[in-house]
Structures are given as C-alpha cells and as structure tokens.
Image (cartoon, rainbow, N blue to C red):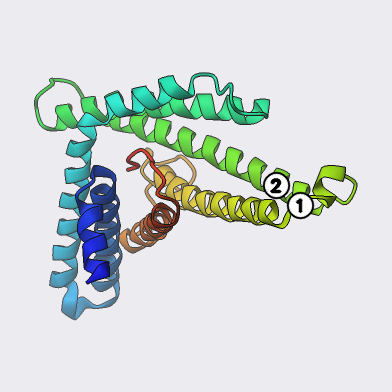
Amino acid sequence: MVALSGLASALESYRGRDRLIRTLGYCCQLVGGVLVEQCPARSEVGTRLLALSSQLSHCRTVLRLFDDVAMFVYTKQYGLGAEEEAIFVRCVSVLGNLADQLYYPCEHVAWAADAKILHVESAPWWTLSTALWGLSLLLGIARSLWMVLKLRQRLRSPLAAFTSRLPQGKRRAVEAQIRSEALTLLSNLADLANAVHWLPPGILWAGRFPPWLVGLLGTISSLLSMYQAVGAGGQAYAAP
C-alpha cells in the first residue's frame, strides 16, 4: 500500500510522470526489439511494443512544449554560477544550460513541421535539437567526471590538512556526492550513445544501433534517473 501511494504521488507531478513514461517507453523498445530480432514467433507482439514505445516518445515530445519557461527560470536563477567555487564547473554548467534552453524551441519547430503546422523541413531541426542535447550531455559528463575526480582527491589526499581532519559526517556526505555524480555520469553516457545514434548517418555510429540496444541504453539511463530522484528528490529537465 505504501509503494502504491508513493507511485500515485509521483504520478501527480509532471517530472515523476515524465520519468515513468520515459522508462516505460524505453522498456517497451527493449523488449519489443528483442522479440522482433530474436523471436520470430512473437514478432507481432514485438512490433506492437515498438509502436507503443513510439507513441510514448511522441507523448513526451508534446509535453515538452511547455518546458521552456521552467528551463528559462532555472537558467536565470543559476546565472553565471556565482555560487560555484570552481571556474570549470561554472563554465560547463552555463554552457549546458544554454544548450538545454536552445534545445526546446528547436524540437518544437521539428514537431510542428512533422505535424504540418509549420511549412518547413523537419529533419534539420531534429538534427539540431539532437546535437544540442548531445552537447548538453557532453558538458554534463565533463562536469560529473571533474567533480568525481576532485571529490576523490579531497578524500584521499593525506597532504591536505582539511582532508585529514574531515569529520565522519562530512566524509559520508562527500562519498554520497561522489556516488551521485558517478550515477549521473553513467546516465549521461548511456543517453549520449543514443543521441549520436539519432544523428544523420555518417557521424560516428549514427543509425547503427538496433532498436533493442537503444531501448537498453535508454532503460539504464531512465532507471538511474529514477533511482536518483527517489533518493534525493532531484529536479531535472525532461531529457529525450
């Protein structure tokens, strides 16, 4: 009953609902892709799951039409990252926020073009939005990697006086932050692999992933995101 109440509470929020739809969509793509490729007798079920995955993805695209304002408010509040101590973290965070902010209108134009609302070619806009998402992921990976290295150095360096006298509670907080950054790093790496796959053919491994692999990477990323949200109650923008 407690778990059911928690699920209902999560579904009442936009972010919680988006995470669940994303996870369900990628899981359907994973299972559907496996059935179509490995189980010919169940290929019809696999095809239906892939269709469901596509519809869930489309649902999230439509819901993201309303994310621009929330992203703008977050970007404005963060500003130039005056509260960050490290200049590197400031730079990559500001650039990441800019990429995220530009991502939404580009995706909106692509969606409107596919829906015949705008008379423009949708493919370039899908490519641009995917490239901006990939750039944001790259910057996030760089930030998380830098944070993990610096935090581990802070814990292990016996030369730093403040480290040797680090209270146990403080040490546990730093270790928890390292785990969080490591999970974010893994999630972003999985998403980045898919982002490259969705770029035009000829760019690295673009277009070469089978549906089940896209579903697997997306499922891993989604589950990691849900785990972090449950553990920390984190707020994140709606990733594709």
- Residue drawn at (24%, 78%) of the image: 39
Image coordinates of residue 204 in percent, x first then y, are 49, 44
What is the quadrant of residue 37 in the picture?
A: bottom left
Secondary structure at numbered mark 2 = helix
186 left or right of 20? right
Q: What is the tally of numbered marks visible in this picture?
A: 2
**Left or right, 158 with reference to 168:** right
Left or right of residue 29: residue 185:
right
Q: Residue at x 18, y 51 (%)?
A: 56
Q: Is residue 95 above or below residue 203?
A: above
| Quadrant of image for the C terminus | top left
Return the residue at label 1. Answer: 155
- Measured in 3D between alpha carbons, the distance from the residue under mark 2 to the one under mark 1, in whole angstroms, is 6 Å
Task: Examine the rendering and report whether any part of residue 122 can be seen.
Answer: no
Tag 2–tag 1 contact (CB < 8 Å): yes
Callout 1: SS: helix
Quick check: can you spot residue 90?
Answer: yes
User: Three-letter amino acid code at disc 1?
Assistant: Leu
Depth check: 110 or 80 in front? Answer: 80
- Per the image, the residue denoted by label 2 is 151
Mark 1 neighbour class, 10 Å CA radius: few under 14, some 14 to 19, many 20 or more: some
**Of 30 and 12, which appears nearest the observer?**
12
Task: State the image coordinates of residue 45 (x, y, percent, origin top left).
Answer: 15, 71
Q: Amino acid at mark 2?
A: Leu
The image quarter containing residue 108 is top left
Q: Position of residue 156 (x, y in %)?
A: 80, 54
Q: Position of residue 91 (x, y in %)?
A: 59, 25
The residue at the point 46 percent across, 40 percent down is 203
Front position in the image: 53 or 232: 232
User: Which one is in front, 104 or 43?
Assistant: 104
29 relative to 104, above or below: below
